[in-house]
Image (spheres, rainbow, N blue to C red):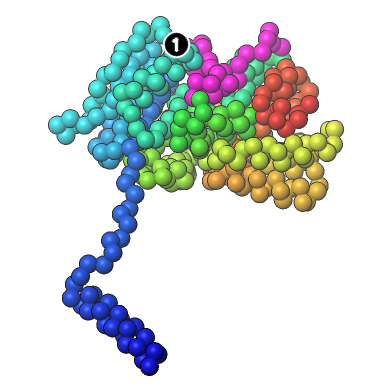
Amino acid sequence: MKRFFLFCITAAMMLATGCAKECGEPEPPTPPEPEDKSHTLIIYMMGDNGLEKFMDNNIGKIMTVVDKIPQTGRIALFYDRGNYTRLSELVVEQGRAKQRVIEEYATSQSSVDPEFMKSVIERVRKEMPADTYGLVLSSHGGGWVPSDIFDIYMLGRPETSGIAPRFFGQDGNDCMEVELLAGVLGDKQFDYILFDACFMSSVEALYELRNAADYIIASPAEVLGDGFPYKEIIPILFNRGHDLENVCRSFMNFYRNSSGTIALIDCKELQPLADNVAAILAKAPAAPDTSNVQAYEGFPSHLYFDLEQYVETLTTDQTALDGFRKALDKAVVYTNHTETFYTDYGQRGEVALPRSCGVTCHIERSDFPETHAAFLETSWAKAVGAK
């Protein structure tokens, strides 16, 4: 009797459920899709250094797609052109894109001054608050390398009068130290930083900046004067999650038939990468044969070498190499390159690039001891126990 009673209850419940669906009663609501977060993109261009015509052209391309960013998105543009220095918001009014000027600065103001850059970023955050922020930095770049040492390589002289900062950015003859840039950018202010500049995918520079953003997009070699394809990438950066791999693909599509190298770096994976390199370096031979390691410019005594190929010269321990490569794959989320790249430094011309891990490193050279002395002062060198 009890079994019959339970069967009847169960059957009644099933009939009731079926009736509810047939009679059009509402089902439990589907959880809504999460709303897109508001996002402010800061573009910081330093063009008082011979890049003015390229930056003018890129700003023109950006203006053609301002109307394609979502309502939750905003774009701030800082531009030091030499004959003017200006912070603007890019807006659409009456169907036309325009620059709404926030502030004009004195042309004598150095755009690579750390306190000034910090004040510009803080001004943008005040004027254009958002849930998330991205940063594009456009100028000359040299990765970790001291600016006056870079000049010495340019001039081909082996002597120097002192160690200057590792540099990013150039305003006239002034350059900015990467350590100072890291201090300006602070801790996790940005979802991403995109370097439209040469040589910024050096592991030394990336490691210095690892706390400033979740991800960094940069090139291990030279970025041609045209820079990034802004018309394509600006709308992508406002996609949910920013779609950074697609940004890199757009870069490669733009340069596929000329010269392009790109990498997307997951900053939280740079410390595990350093730990793996440190373990290998501790057991490395005193003088490994690095003669066949890929270089990324045309200087007679190179400044930038492929990180993976360098580590391969340090050990024959396959387990250690496998661990390093796993750490590298986690740190370098995406990388791609053309079969050759063009260099304007040293021996100008095309350089074969059959293989690239997307990140460069320093290798000690006997003819430039000052360079190695400067390298030993970097946070990366200290983290991996370099000597």
Q: Amino acid at mark 1?
A: Ser
Where does the image place residue 48, in percent across and percent down from the top left? Answer: 42, 15
From what the image shows, is residue 4 above or below residue 18?
Answer: below
Q: Residue at x 78, y 23 (%)?
A: 366
From what the image shows, is residue 369 above or below residue 289?
Answer: above
Where does the image place residue 179, in percent across and percent down from the top left? Answer: 58, 21
Residues 188 and 304: in front is: 188
Q: Residue at x 74, y 36 (%)?
A: 278
**Quarter occupied by the N terminus:** bottom left
Say if residue 300 shows up in the picture.
Answer: no
**Quarter occupied by the C terminus:** top right
Magenta-drawn stretch contains 243: no
Name of the residue lying farthest toward the right: 286
Say if residue 213 shows up in the picture.
Answer: yes
304 horizontally vs 246: left or right = right
Q: In which quadrant of the rendered view does residue 362 lie? A: top right
Which class describes the residues within 10 Å of circle 1: few (<14), some (14-19), or many (20+)? many
384 horizontally vs 203: left or right = right
Residue highlighted by disc 1: 110
Where does the image place residue 281, in percent across and percent down from the top left? Answer: 78, 36
Where does the image place residue 37, in percent across and percent down from the top left? Answer: 34, 41
Residues 270 and 85: in front is: 270
First to last magenta residue range? 159-185
Q: Residue at x 66, y 40 (%)?
A: 273
192 horizontally vs 57: left or right = right
- Please tell me whether mark 1 sits on a helix, a strand or a loop: loop
From what the image shows, is residue 165 above or below residue 256?
Answer: above
Name of the residue lying farthest toward the left: 94
Q: Residue at x 60, y 16 (%)?
A: 165
Name of the residue lying farthest toward the bottom: 1
